[in-house]
Image (spheres, coloured by chain):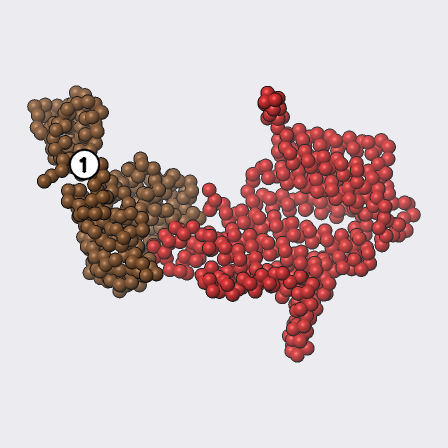
Chain colours: A brown, B red
Amino acid sequence: MIELQNLNKLFNQTHAVDDVSLLVNSGEFCMLIGSSGCGKSTTLRMINRLIEPTSGSISINGEDVKSVPVEDLRRKIGYAIQGVGLFPHQDIFENIATVPKLLKWSKTEIEQRVEELLTLFHLDYETFAHKFPHQLSGGQQQRVGVARALAARPELLLMDEPFGALDAITRNYLQDEMLRIQKQLNITIIMVTHDIEEAVKLGDKIAVMDKGKLLQVASPIELMRNPRDGFVRELVGGDDRALNLLSLVKVEDVMTPIADIGKKPQSQHLSDKDNLRDALSRLLWVGESSLPVINSEGKIIGNVALVDILAKGKKQK
Amino acid sequence: MSQLSESASNLSSKISFDKVDILASLLLFFSLLGLPILTYQPNRLTSGTGRYLFDVFPGSIGVLILAVFLFFFFLIVRRLSVALTIGIIVVAMVGLFYLVGEGANYVLPKDAGFARVALGSGFWVACLALWLTFANNILKLRASPLFHVVVFIAMSCLFGLLIYVGLWDALSLMKEYKNELAFWSHARRHLFLSIASLVPAIIVGIPTGIWCSRSKIIKAAVFPVLNILQTIPSIAMFGILMIPLTYIATNYPGLGELGIRGIGAAPAIVALFFYSLLPIVSNTTVGLDKLDATIVEAARGMGMNSRQRLFKIELPLAAPVILSGIRIVLVQNIGIVAVAGLIGGGGFGTYIFKGLNQTATELVMLGAIPTLYLALFAAILMDSIIGFSKRKIDD
């Protein structure tokens, strides 16, 4: 559990962070969102004390971050940033081994851990361990960057717009990877982003900041349905709002049973874990008003109609 | 018009000339025909008269030599495989060395007396031309930096051997060499002075550079001083240093016996140390200041303390820039050490100043050529080290 209490940061009389209080539970994926210069990165960097707050306090599992030496604190918190910041003169193995080496793990322990992490990120150990960062693609570099941040099994991972510089396809893939890894490792993640779609897709909890102030903290659905007036409404209230809302609901939650259950689908179909946004897109594309839904074994388990989807995207009174 | 240029580019892509090789070949041809390859001097102190290729080797021998070199140009420009071209250039170089060594015997009268034969401008320009095309073709191999050092040493051995077996014994340069029994001790002295000033400059310069990159105030205080030191001419610097060093030597005789005197090695080393500081300090500062901020930020965020960041991340990444500073200093020092000959510091400068006093040009050459050679070797060696330090970092 991470608790920020009345956090303030002044840079030359300007209030970069203005009285921010936030609670992030263990195992939660918390998104800090806002436009550039709103203080979200400053807030994040105060957690691992890259920036010291002017006033206020931060505690992790009830322990004030100032109570431990700053290097020890940082070695216990994973940190991944937009520019990745891999060390260009060290190979992938050495890069990932950075924190374990600082913590003086044994050689075999480090080797095991690096192999484990590369496997976790679907990077082949033999192929990648002894390559240098510049030999990797942008997406691979960022995966190594996150693997490096996770090397010493931190319970908390801070990410500062880690996917901001990547193309849409790679970004989408890495977002899915992060969701999988966060569930698998059951760690707490606080991620800074300026992309509401990314926030909605990844976050269990979204904290919206503007001009140094924390405006609203809510679950994605709550934020979509009841945004506070002003900046938050602007942020979520674009034309995509209904679609963003749909992307939060899975097909299996709205499907209705049909007669063909247990059979193999004849032609076009949806899968139970798809979200409604993708399902809607598919229905429009194939020009059907409804499609059968299959489960992971490829058997039909129900049916989803266009009207059911449209109802979910509608403003609720 | 466009058709014309198109067909021209087609032609050039088929034959594909190398501009540097052509230029060097033309230069070589011109220097052998249009400049004296040797100089005849009635005695070692007179300036002498030029001897062209056809003066030295009259008639059919001269024509034959020219024909052989023409064939070389043809082969070099023809662009055979790079390795073969390099081989041809080396053969041409050996040929040129042999030509001037043998030519000296032709020029020298039987009852030579005080007469001397010196290398002429034609030889030097031809050397330059061959070296140019040689370097150009070596670079085309895209070999490792270490290879360049190996090539340089191999070439030194080859031509050193040619001179050692007496190919140039008839030349005035070798006669001066045989008169100067202290040549090799001056050589060692020259190297010692160049390196003895570099080591303390590295020990002081790198920490100062690190300090400057950490604090703007220190930087503002240190750089003007180093800049001023750098602009003092070397002879003036030796003069300025004589005063305090002489004072120390007279008041503390113990130190004087250790070699700290107004003239000799002490002022040379101190002056060179001062000259060495600016390139090392400024390159260290720039190297550290220009580091990718995200890399340093990542290192900080992962819990490296400032010492770990400096030694594991910052210095290794700034190493190529710092090493280029050391390269500048080493090459520069080898040159300035020659001036130390003036104040009794020893080294090849001794011959340069002795030769200048006697107006004996070839004695000046005996000091200048090894100095040039050392500087060139230092540059190639340092480039190789810099190249090695860059290899992992570059894309």
Instruction: Relative to B370, say whether B124 is above or below.
Output: above
Residue B268 spot, x, y in % from top left: 66, 64
Q: Residue reaching furthest right? A: B111
Q: Observer-nearest residue: A137 or A52?
A: A52
Q: Quadrant of the N terminus of chain B?
A: top right
Q: Circle 1 is placed at which residue position?
A: A242
The three-letter amino acid code for the residue at tag 1 is: Ala
Q: Kindly identify the residue that appears in the image at 78 percent across and 55 percent down.
A: B363
Asked if residue B285 can be seen in this view, the reply is yes
User: Label 1 lies in what chain?
Assistant: A
In the rendered image, the residue lying farthest to the front is A230
Query: Horizontal placement of B219 versus A97: left or right?
Result: right
Residue lying farthest bottom?
B251
> In this rendering, would A106 be left or right of A179?
right
Q: Secondary structure at mark 1?
A: helix
Q: Residue at x 76, y 39 (%)?
A: B31
Residue at left 75%, top 47%?
Answer: B163
Instruction: Answer yes or no: is residue B105 visible.
Output: no
**Horizontal and vertical percent position of residue A200:** 22, 42
On screen, B337 above or below A119? below
Mark 1, other Cα within 10 Å: few <14 / some 14–19 / many ≥20: some
Which residue is drawn at the image coordinates 34% and 37% (left, top)? A167
Of B211 and B161, nearer the camera is B211
Does A101 sit above or below residue A278?
below
Q: Position of residue B234 (x, y in %)?
A: 67, 62
